[in-house]
Image: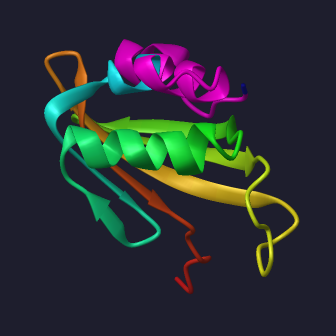
Amino acid sequence: MNTNAHPAVLPDVVAAYIEAVNAFDVDAVMATFADAAVVNDASREFADPASIRAWLVREIVGDKVTMDVTELSRRGNLTIVRARYDGTYDKTGLPEELVLTNYLTDADGRITSLVIVHNQPSPY
């Protein structure tokens, strides 16, 4: 993992989330989320544990998604993680190297929100 910030800025729960995703471990990923967590992936909101688990089973673990972290930063309780994604998902129309930005907030050692975005370069 390459980081542009000191590794200490990465909260343990975010490191555990990435490790669990890469291990295809649904239960370990779920353990990183607060009970009232909200996930937004590709403009779709999952706002309860059952829907988050279903998303993980089908689209993350089911598609063998892996994250190779390329950059991270921390602003207050917001962690921004950019990572190269790979897996067995349908790659039609996606760039050869898919880099997604994950915006994670945490409180009391659990992830309270996760937003995954395919950012475009800023014109500024």
Position in image of residue 106 (x %, y %): 23, 30
Q: Residue furthest right?
A: 96
Find out whether residue 65 is within the magenta segment.
no
Seen at 77% across and 48% down, the residue is 86
Position in image of residue 41 (x %, y %): 43, 60
State the image quarter where residue 97 is shown: bottom right
Q: Quarter holding the N terminus?
A: top right
Seen at 63% across and 42% down, the residue is 62
Q: How many marks?
A: 0
In this rendering, would 62 be left or right of 38? right
Q: Nearer the viewer, residue 35 or 69?
A: 35
Seen at 72% across and 29% down, the residue is 2
Q: Nearer the viewer, residue 62 or 95?
A: 62
Seen at 26% across and 41% down, the residue is 50
State the image quarter where residue 65 is shown: top right
Position in image of residue 89 (x %, y %): 73, 57
In this rendering, would 36 be left or right of 82? left
- Magenta residues: mostly which secondary structure? helix
Residue 9, visible in the rendered structure: no
What residue span does the magenta drawing correspond to? 2-27
Q: How is colour applied across the structure in the image?
A: rainbow
In this rendering, would 85 be left or right of 38? right
Residue 85, visible in the rendered structure: yes
From what the image shows, is residue 40 above or below residue 67?
Answer: below
Position in image of residue 37 (x %, y %): 19, 40
From what the image shows, is residue 119 above or below residue 22?
Answer: below
From what the image shows, is residue 2 above or below residue 6?
Answer: below
